[in-house]
Every structure is written in C-alpha cells, then in structure tokens.
C-alpha cells in the first residue's frame, strides 16, 4: 500500500473507515486532512471511495497535481 502524501498545509492526512456498527453497513473510506474546517476557505481536501487503497491512490494523485501547479 502507498504511503499518504502530506496535505498542502504539510499535515499528515488521516484515513477513516465509515462503518455503521449498528447494522454493519459499510460506507467505504474517507481520506482527508485533520485541519479541515468549514471555516477555512480553500482547505476542503478529502477523497472518498469503497476501498482504502483506492482512496490513498486518489489522494496521492491529487497531491501530485497540486505539486505540479505550485
């Protein structure tokens, strides 16, 4: 599995498994920056998906795109 690349704020993103323990519903995964806040404009990076690996791959792809733009 790939290592998560840092967010543009340099913090390490977190992976959250969205699992409903009550009825065992699996809603997939979210990768996002722990600094996220609805009050911080422009800092809303997150990726959702059904597998942890696909989320990490997409997060890293977007991080590479951000690096290319800088």
Image: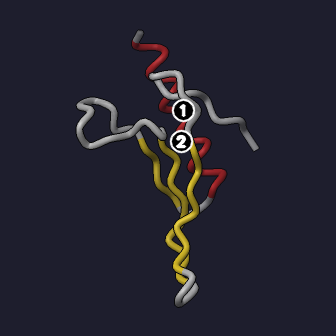
Q: According to the image, label 2 marks what residue?
A: 58
Q: According to the image, label 1 marks what residue?
A: 61
Please state if 65 lies on the left or on the right of 52 as rendered.
left
The residues bearing labels 1 and 2 have C-alpha atoms spaced at a distance of: 5 Å
Looking at the picture, how far across and down is residue 19, in whole percent? Answer: 55, 73
> Quarter holding the C terminus?
top left
* SS label for mark 1: helix
Question: CB under 8 Å between callouts 1 and 2?
Answer: yes
Looking at the picture, how far across and down is residue 48, in whole percent? Answer: 47, 54
Q: Nearer the viewer, residue 50 or 15?
A: 15
Q: Residues within 10 Å of mark 2 (few under 14, many from 20)?
A: some
- In the rendering, which numbered label is found on residue 70? none
Please state if 2 lies on the left or on the right of 44 as rendered.
right
Q: How many marks?
A: 2
Looking at the picture, how far across and down is residue 23, in whole percent? Answer: 53, 90
Looking at the picture, how far across and down is residue 58, in whole percent? Answer: 53, 41
Among the 4 quarters of the image, the one containing residue 3: top right
Q: Residue at x 48, y 43 (%)?
A: 32
Q: Residues within 10 Å of mark 1 (few under 14, many from 20)?
A: few
């Amino acid at each position: 599995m790939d290592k998560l690349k840092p967010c543009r704020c340099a913090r390490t993103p977190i992976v959250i498994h969205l699992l409903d323990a009550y009825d065992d519903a699996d809603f997939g995964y979210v990768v996002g920056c722990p600094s996220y806040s609805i009050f911080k404009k422009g800092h809303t990076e997150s990726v959702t998906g059904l597998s942890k690996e696909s989320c990490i791959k997409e997060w890293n792809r977007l991080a590479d795109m951000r690096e290319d733009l800088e």
